[in-house]
Image (tube, rainbow, N blue to C red):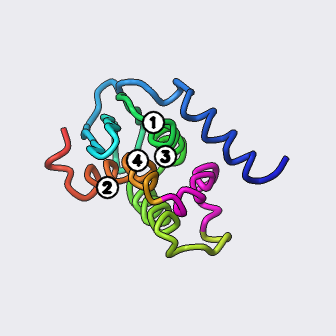
Amino acid sequence: MELNALYNQIIVENSRSSQNRHKVSEATASLEGVNPSCGDDIVLELRVKDGIIEDAGFTGEGCAISQASASLMIDLILGKPVEEAQNLLKTFLGMIKGEISDEAQLDSLEDAIALKGISHMPGRVKCAVLPWHTLMGIIEEPETAK
């Protein structure tokens, strides 16, 4: 299977998956992310205990890219320390901006690397980064999240 076809399959499967599409019981942080240019609207919820992301989920509506990106991000950060999630966030945004292209560095993104090709589609970049920017809001400004 060609790499692009595999990446497309990962995006389609994650955009339809309900695995990470749920409210989080006893969430410690919740933040809405909106992309007014296309109507994507998600609410990201996290439960963090002792610096570890114990649970994460999202609800909302949006295009396949935003929904897949949210699901892939949650798969990646679940069970990880907040600091590691922040590093993954920086790596993902660097990949999308075209600032990070070193495959070894991008390996940490696991299946989220499937969104790398979005960087060449400016109209879709905002869709892909919406959940990640929402996560950034929770991590960098926890007092505004909840």
In the rendered structure, are the residues bearing label 2 and label 4 in contact, judged by CB atoms less than 8 Å apart? no
Mark 2 and mark 1: Cα distance apart in space: 20 Å
Can residue 79 be seen here? The reply is no
Closest to the observer: 140 or 48? 140
Q: Position of residue 41 (x, y in %)?
A: 31, 36
Name the amino acid type tagged 3.
Met
Q: Disc 1 on helix, strand or loop?
A: loop
In the image, is residue 42 above or below residue 19? below
- Circle nearer the N terminus (2, 4): 4
**Quarter-wise, where is residue 39 in the image?**
top left
Name the amino acid type tagged 4.
Ile
Q: Which residue is mark 2?
A: 136
Q: Position of residue 89 (x, y in %)?
A: 43, 59
Q: Which residue is mark 1?
A: 63
Closest to the observer: 19 or 117? 117
Other residues around mark 2 within 10 Å, as few (<14) / some (14–19) / many (≥20): some
Task: Name the mark on residue 73.
Answer: 3
- Circle nearer the N terminus (2, 1): 1
Q: Which residue corresponds to the image point at 18% horizontal and 38% vertical from the top-left?
A: 146
- 114 inside magenta stretch: yes
- Circle nearer the N terminus (4, 1): 4
Q: Disc 3 on helix, strand or loop?
A: helix
- Circle nearer the N terminus (3, 1): 1
Task: Name the mark on residue 52.
Answer: 4
In the rendered structure, are the residues bearing label 2 and label 1 in contact, judged by CB atoms less than 8 Å apart? no
Mark 4 and mark 1: Cα distance apart in space: 29 Å
In the image, is residue 13 above or below residue 51? above
Q: Which residues are magenta?
A: 106-121
Mark 3 and mark 1: Cα distance apart in space: 16 Å
Name the amino acid type tagged 1.
Cys
In the rendered structure, are the residues bearing label 3 and label 2 in contact, judged by CB atoms less than 8 Å apart? no
